[in-house]
Amino acid sequence: MKNELKILLASPRGFCAGVDRAIEIVNKALDKYGSPVYVRHEIVHNKQVVENLKKRGAIFVEELSEIKDVTRPVIFSAHGVPKKVPEEAKLKNLSYVDATCPLVSKVHRESEQLYKNGFDIILIGHKNHPEVIGTMGQLPSGSIKLIETAEEVKFLEIKNFKKPLAYITQTTLSVDDTFEIIKLLKNKFPLIKGPVKEDICYATTNRQRAVKKIAPQCDMVFIIGSRNSSNSVRLVEVAKKAGCKNSTLMHFGKELPIEEIKKCKKIGISSGASAPEELVQNLINDIKRDCKVLIEEVVVAEEKVVFKLPKELN
């Protein structure tokens, strides 16, 4: 006889508006221009999405210098790119489509405005993440100081106290961790200016809220997403902090710990903003082979955000 298992399904989960838009941009470009279409960096951080687009004729490169046929269009990923990338594309006469998430572009515009107004700028984010590289690359080298942890705030030194100070953030950070860092920054620099509307995006916030709600009730929590997906990794951290120490990132190729699941009464499932819903359903179907499953969807917000496509693809 199969074990009875309750699954709490976090909602919202999976694709956000920025990811939907980025994938649609690649598909529309393939429809319009035929294959191949080049994409600089993974369009979103999900192996299955990338593999599906490769099958349609997308070629993924890390740098524009890798593009073999300069007559073909190139798409910039949802994470955003440094200013030098479109400049290089123009020099090479490459036609390009920018799939940067509009909420990342908002942070780019904020940084440019702050720089223009004479601010020293602190960016809260993860070193070497493509979004952080893109944001720092909007301004001349050395214009933005990056901090990753609350600990770093203690050692942060501002050389020119005459200049006003401001902070911006990566869009996919842990809401709680970032709140702590901002609190420390405000204590240390009472006049520091923050964004009018916070930079962590609605989708990151909603997915973390949903996981936070289900995690304390669960024996195990599974987050579906890639290892290089910042928002997916943050969801695992959020689940652990919220009370479910046995929280795991289910990435491509990771084996399902079914024997462990069989010992549980209740598990939670969510997915990062770049993970397709079919991966969630596949996971549930795999569990159903060994367990009698009852599913409860736990909804913390309704998402109706849609971003327009670039005009060149309309």
Image (tube, grey):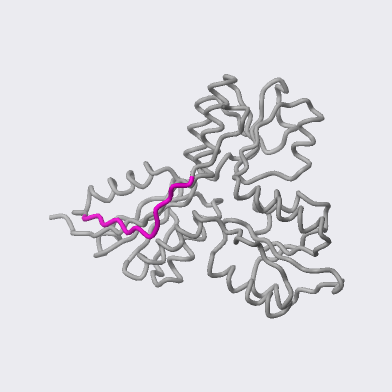
The C terminus sits in image quarter? top right
Give residue 293's quadrant in the image. Answer: bottom left
Which of the 4 image quarters holds residue 209?
A: bottom left
Q: Residue at x 47, y 60 (%)?
A: 235
In the rendering, at what x and y percent does residue 154 appear? 71, 78
Q: Would you place residue 246 above or below residue 64 in this image? A: below
- What segment carries the magenta color? 294-305
Q: Residue at x 79, y 35 (%)?
A: 88
If the image is split into quadrants, where does the N terminus sit? bottom left
Depth check, front residue: 287 or 198: 198
- Residue plotted at (70% across, 74% down): 153
**Image quadrant where residue 22 sits:** top right
Judged left or right of residue 301, residue 121 is: right
112 relative to 122, above or below: above
Please tell me which residue is depicted at 55% across the width and 37% down the height of the picture. 308
Residue 19 percent location from the top left of the image: 52, 43
Residue at the extreme left: 1
